[in-house]
Structures are given as C-alpha cells and as structure tokens.
Image (tube, rainbow, N blue to C red):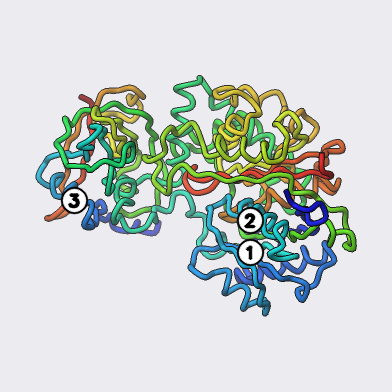
Amino acid sequence: MSKPNRRAVIVGVATSDYPNLPDMSEQQVHAQAAERALADAGVEFADLDGYATTGFFPMFAVGMCEYFGIRPHYVDETNWGGASFEVLVEHAATAVEAGVCDIVLVTYGSIQLSAMGRKLGTGGGTGAPAGPAAFDQLWGNTLVGSYALAAQRHMYEFGTTSEQLAEVAVTMRAHAANNPMAQYRDPITVADVLSSRMIADPLHMLDCCVISDGGGACVVTTEERARDLRKPPVYILGGAHAMTHHMGISQMPEVTVTAAAQSGPLAFRRAGLTPADVDTLQVYDSFTITVVLSLEDLGFCEKGEGGAFVQGGRLRFDGELPTNTDGGGLSACHPGMRGMFLIVEAVRQLRGESVNQAPDPKIAVAHGTGGMLSTGATLVLGTEVP
Amino acid sequence: MSPSKPEPKPRPAPIPDAETEPYWQAVNEGRLMVQRCTVCGRSQLYPRWRCLRCRGEVEWVDASGGGTVYSFTVIRQNFSRSFRHLIPYVVALVDLDEGPRLMTNLVGVDPDDVEIGMRVRVKFEHVSDEASVPLFEPA
C-alpha cells in the first residue's frame, strides 16, 4: 500500500498541434506537447525528476532528455507499441508512489504523415524476413491485413457484420465533427463505410484509422504535490499491461482474444472497480475491429457480443458508454502510437474539458493496443479515490 | 502520360539463421517440417530452443502437408513491389494437421471462394535459386 499522500495522479495533459505538421521535426512535436502539458499542470522543466517516452530507435528517451536539457534520475522507454504510453504512465505511477521520483513528464511526438506519406498499413515495408520474423513476412501481408485476419475470424465465430464494425467508424466521425483539430470532420454513414474501398477483406478504408502527424504529453506526480498545482488531479487508480505475441499474428493464440483480456481485469482489480463503474472509455481504434475486440476483452460485454454492443449509439458521447470522444484514431488523429491521446482525452473528460463532454464522468478507462494486436495496456483513472 | 509503375520485384526470400535453417532447407527440397517435442509430442513453429508447453527437447519431423484455413484476408492494397502486381491475393492463417499455425498465401483458388475451415494442402514455390516458400492450395 502506498502512503496516501504519495498516491499517483495526473496533473497536466496536452496534445501538440495535429494532424498536419510539415514544418515541424519529431522533437519539436514532443516539445510543443511537453510545454503545453507542463503549463497545464503549472510545472517547470526544472521541477522534473522523471521522464518517459518511446520511439523506434534505442536510447530514444536519453536523446529526448538531452534535447530538453534535463537530467532526470528516473527514465523509462518501454516500447509496448501503440499501448506504450499507458505502460509508461503505469510505471510512472508506481515510481512516484514508491518514492523513486516526484514528477514525471511523459511525451509522444510523430511526424509520420509528413515523413512517410500514407503508406503505413499498406506500404509493404515489414522488415527483413530473417529469423522468427520470416514466418510472417514472406506473404505480402500488411498491417491492415493482420487486423483483417482477426476481423474475418470474429465474423466467422460470432456472426459480427461489416455494418456493426462500420457503426464504430460512424460514431468516431460524429465525435470528430465537434473537434476543430480532427483530421476528418464531415459526417459519414454506415453505407459510406461499406462503400469505401476494400483494403483487406473485410476491412474497408473507413474501417482504418487515419494517418497523421501529432503528439501529446502528460505529467504524473503525487497527490501531495498536486495540491499546489493549477488543476484538480486525476487519480491513477489502476494500471496493467499484457501481450500475446510480437509482430507476427500467426503466433497469437486466438486472433479474437487480445491482451486486453489479461490487462483489463488486472487493472480493474488493482483499482477495485469493474467495467460497470466506467463512465467513459478512450480505447485504441486503429481499426473498427480493434474497438469491438477491446470492448469484449475489457469486460464491457461478453466475448462475441461486441458487434451488437457498438450499435444503437451506445458509444456516442451522450450514450451509455461515451467512447473516443475526441474522434479517435479513426477520424481525429493517428500518428502511429496513439496511446497518449487516449490518456489526454480521458483526463479531459474527467475534468469536464472535452469537446464532446460526457455528463459528469467520475471514472475513465484508457486502453491502448499495440503492434499487430500484439500488446495491450489499461489505465483506470478517476476524479477521486473510490 | 500516366507515370509508369515501378518494375515488380520477386517475392522476398527467407533469410535463415542457425535455428530456422533446417526448416528453410527442407522447404527448398519440397518438404514441410515441424518441430516436435520428444517428451510430450506437441508440435510447434516457428522453431524454439525447447517445447513451449513442457520445455522438453525438440526434434524436426516431416509434416503431412495438410491443413485447415483458420482465417484469411484478401489483400487489395499493398505498395510493395514484390506484391502489388499480385493484387488481389489471399493471405491466410493455416492450422497444420500437426497443430502449428502458419501464415501463408492461398493460391489456385478464386479469392471470393476462400472460406474459413477449408481444407488445404502445401505446395512449394521457388523464389530464388536457393530458396522456396510453402504456399497452400485447396486440398
């Protein structure tokens, strides 16, 4: 048990500008988000004794410390793919509660769209087919194709339909309409999704996330430090992460059961809560199927019932489970590892700052998914300690 | 004038290492192998140091070559020069009769006719002078 006054909280969040940043470097995106999150918290760079980020190159976090001109004694760059930032915040919470450090800045930044164009997902660049990786890299499968394999199997096992998956995309677009920064804001219908180009059966173009530039940041500290800061703290009530496989989906035991089935129940147990307690969900929506699988595995509905669950406006900001209220990766912004955006939006909901504000939420969940449905990480956040 | 498309490239060839070399050697000779546990008899791919179930020692054995489609997708967009000229093509997860699941391409079948549960059989395709890959076709 942590001492009550060292309970971990989030005191600052921000996104960088998004979704098109042709005139910014990757480091500048981190820096812009960091500056805004620190200002949101009322914290200075000089106050930091912890820092966390992750990128695609070894010692990336060390490079960012150098870039920022900080020398923290707690640094973490655990790479859990798109779910990394939920893990980094879980770790930061553990560190501040243990007294290892007092204030941790977590940042993310990407200029994927400007640097690489729209080839993520179907660019064919999957690395050299060497060693174990060769077993999944010789077949022209794409990132979209891996998620399509899961969607196809889910349809076969549970009767999930393309119309049900489309409902997820339609809901996210409705949320994006109210987010002035969102990449796509024009409303779409289920018919629009179904008539969009097929990328990898059964996933259409509008079942796939957008490709963006952008980043975000958050500040983790103790309840005690938060008393002197600008905004009411958001409590990190529980966190957990899990994986099923690395980058080859042939090694995933069942493609319809994700790491969320492990990380979700563990995070809820640590928080002393259940899915029924959750007022808003910010969940990784790399593809529409990702949302359906996550809802089932986190325990918001039974396995196989995710397709029916997303219908009837249940995920809308004024619905039963307001989900991805910034417009999600499907419509607002997906720079490659979107997990940070989930945390930012969850905190904004709990503070009453969302562009699609749910009515007075007390408990929010941010759940990230990374790799080829490979990793999951769940954070349970709250306005107070239940 | 529309810009000319880049020249197609051959399928990528596997790059064996010390642990996967026996598998790819056999594939190049027209044989599909799996790794089998000498203690509990469970089969696995890709190859590992020990059995993933009981940590027993493993050996290479020939597989029957038969399998069942566990899932599939039809790739309709891929900018890779090794694959774009093959579009639309089927990427599948095939459960071998011995147990291990392989990613592969289904060939010799209209993509619209592929179904989960379909019985398939291995065939081999040379991708270079020294390497082949195992593809599957309807049994």
Which quarter of the rendered picture does the C terminus of chain A lie within?
Answer: top right
Could you say where residue B78 lies in the image, as x and y percent from the top left?
40, 48
Tell me whether marks 1 and 2 sit on the same chain: yes
| Residue drawn at the location 85% of the way across and 48% of the way down | A351
What chain letter is assigned to the residue under label 3? Answer: B
Q: Amino acid at mark 2?
A: His
Q: Amino acid at mark 1?
A: Ala
Could you say where residue A272 lies in the image, as x and y percent from the top left?
72, 36
Q: Nearer the viewer, residue A205 or B100?
A: B100
Q: Which mark is residue A91?
A: 2
Q: Residues within 10 Å of mark 2 (few under 14, many from 20)?
A: some
CB contact under 8 Å: marks 3 and 2 = no
* Residue holding disc 3: B127
Q: Nearer the viewer, residue A262 or A162?
A: A262
Which SS class for mark 3?
Answer: loop
Q: Residue furthest top?
A: A159
Q: Residues within 10 Å of mark 1 (few under 14, many from 20)?
A: many
Residue A110, compared with residue A175, is above or below; it is: below
Q: Nearer the viewer, mark 1 or mark 2?
A: 2
CB contact under 8 Å: marks 1 and 2 = yes
Q: Which mark is residue A52?
A: 1
Q: Nearer the viewer, residue A188 or A152?
A: A152
CB contact under 8 Å: marks 3 and 1 = no
| Residue drawn at the location 84% of the way across and 44% of the way down | A384
Q: Residue furthest left?
A: B29
Q: Amino acid at mark 3?
A: Val
Q: How many marks?
A: 3
What chain letter is assigned to the residue under label 1? Answer: A
